[in-house]
Amino acid sequence: MSDTILETVGLTREFKGFVAVSGVDLRVATGSIHALIGPNGAGKTTCFNMLTKFLAPTRGTIKFKGRDITREKPADVARLGLIRSFQISAVFPHLSSLENVRLALQRARGGSFDFWRSESLLHMYDDRARALLEDVGLSEYILTTAGELSYGRKRALEIATTLALDPEMMLLDEPTAGMTHEDVERIVALIRRIRTGRTILMVEHNLSVVEGLCDRITVLTRGRVLAEGDYDTVSKNPEVIAAYLGSADA
């Protein structure tokens, strides 16, 4: 068995008496693609936000590579190699694809993003930025303004900027949400391609997306773990089927 890179014990989040996530135990194996899925309102995004420290847990612990990060700040967690994307594409719409990735690469210099630095100094990042854009299938759109890209290509650009931060573990929030069938296939193929040397945890609601892609799937409903296992196991689970048909709507 692979070592565990990310682990939660009893992860719980309450909002003024409403329990959005309750007692979630999660273990993500190093080098795996692990999906966190469930019906709308199941607690997936709340759980994800706690893992990446955008929400503080009410109770429970989170460990990354054996280190307790329960009370760490988002920036500190990112520096440890735990990097996330967002459900809403977070790119600079008025900058080109190359410029977006180049800004992310400036992290290698230290803690600042120097928008005012001379163009010649910024060009030192161009080769790496071009390589990352090629990795995510955007080599034809290097000079295209991000705002002009299709929705699916914006998500690919966001993944490129995430990769620029050299993450040990990537957390992808609904990477295929709102996409056409063609874009979904493109992003699934991209995730499969970039997994080498990385661990990926993705929040997803669509079982067909994780089929053949994920090594392990955790299903949430009503803020609790409903089932866990590989695709064959969870897709045949009567409780999972009921949840997706709406009888366990959360």
Image (spheres, rainbow, N blue to C red):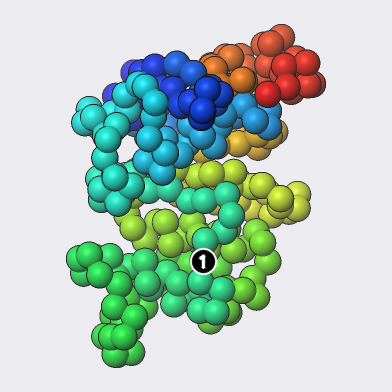
- For the point 51% across and 34% down, which residue is it? 46
Q: Residues within 10 Å of mark 1 (few under 14, many from 20)?
A: some
- For the point 50% across and 44% down, which residue is it? 172
Q: Is residue 93 above or below residue 165?
A: below
Left or right: 74 with respect to 91?
left
Q: Is residue 46 visible?
A: yes
- For the point 54% across and 44% down, which residue is it? 173
Residue lying furthest front: 16
Number of on-image labels: 1
Left or right: 103 with respect to 220?
left
Q: Secondary structure at mark 1?
A: loop
Q: Which residue occupies the foreground of this view, 203 or 215?
A: 203
Q: Quadrant of residue 211?
A: top right
Q: Is residue 63 above or below residue 203?
A: above
How far from the left and from the top, in percent, is residue 100? 45, 72
How far from the left and from the top, in percent, is residue 204? 60, 36
Circle 1: residue type: Val
How far from the left and from the top, in percent, is residue 184? 68, 49
In the picture, the quarter occupied by the C terminus is: top right
Q: Which residue occupies the foreground of this view, 133 or 171?
A: 171
Residue at label 1? 91
Q: Which residue occupies the foreground of this view, 97 or 226?
A: 226
In the picture, the quarter occupied by the N terminus is: top left
- For the point 69% across and 11% down, which residue is it? 239
Q: Quadrant of residue 233?
A: top right
Left or right: 167 with respect to 35?
left
Left or right: 105 with respect to 213?
left
How far from the left and from the top, in percent, is residue 174? 59, 43
